[in-house]
Image (tube, rainbow, N blue to C red):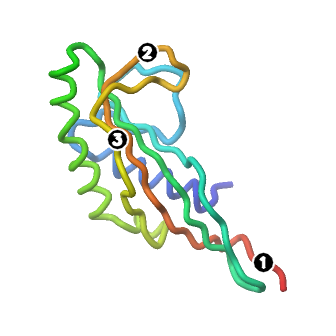
Amino acid sequence: MADELDTVVENLRAILDGVAGIKKAHGTPLEGFSEFPLAIVWVEGGTLRGGAGSPAVGVHQVFADVHLMRANLPGDVAVARPFVLKVWTAVAAEVTLSGACEYCLLRSYRGPGTMRQADGSSTTVGVHFEFDVKVHHSGITFSA
């Protein structure tokens, strides 16, 4: 059963899937990379708050990485650079992620530069994005 965070990840993944130059966006970590450029979206952490008798409100840190194959570092960094504004513009145009959240705001980004796959198997070039996403969790209510 999908919850609000699953919907946030899926909707952000769909937005990144539509960014020019990204071949495929994924909503789960990957064991290995086979097609480039690619994007990966995941929830890293957050806070969950609520008062007695009220639904929970979460502010979650949702991360996204755009990876490009590394062949020539200076050239690859130049190719990755436009993704900073492409991703920011695409998310800013759909700040509620199609109604999945109150807002999804870019908090910070790193890169373009070298990035390592989660399993440490290879190094790519890309940009790391960190978003603050505010979600009203209808399924969680604090008792009085």
- Asked whether disc 1 touches disc 2, contact meaning CB atoms under 8 Å apart, the reply is no
Q: Quadrant of residue 114?
A: top left
Q: Which residue is mark 1?
A: 142
Q: Quadrant of the C terminus?
A: bottom right
Q: Quadrant of residue 11?
A: bottom left
Say few, some or many: other residues with alpha carbon within 10 Å of mark 2 (under 14 / 14 to 19 / 20 or more). few
The relative height of residue 4 versus residue 42 in the rendered view (above or below) is below
Q: Which residue is mark 3?
A: 110
Give the structural element (helix, strand or loop) at label 1.
Answer: loop
The relative height of residue 92 versus residue 66 in the rendered view (above or below) is below
Q: Whole-percent x and y of residue 110?
A: 34, 41
Residue at 30% across / 29% down in the picture?
113
The kind of residue tagged 2 is Ser
Give the structural element (helix, strand or loop) at label 2.
Answer: loop
The kind of residue tagged 3 is Arg
Q: Earlier in the sequence, mark 1 or mark 2?
A: 2
Q: Whole-percent x and y of residue 29?
A: 53, 33
Residue at 71% across / 70% down in the picture?
139
Q: Earlier in the sequence, mark 1 or mark 3?
A: 3
Q: CA distance from mark 2 to mark 3?
A: 18 Å
Q: Whole-percent x and y of residue 133?
A: 48, 62
Residue at 20% across / 37% down in the picture?
81
The relative height of residue 133 versus residue 74 in the rendered view (above or below) is below
Give the numbered dot on residue 122: 2
Q: Nearer the viewer, mark 2 or mark 3?
A: 3
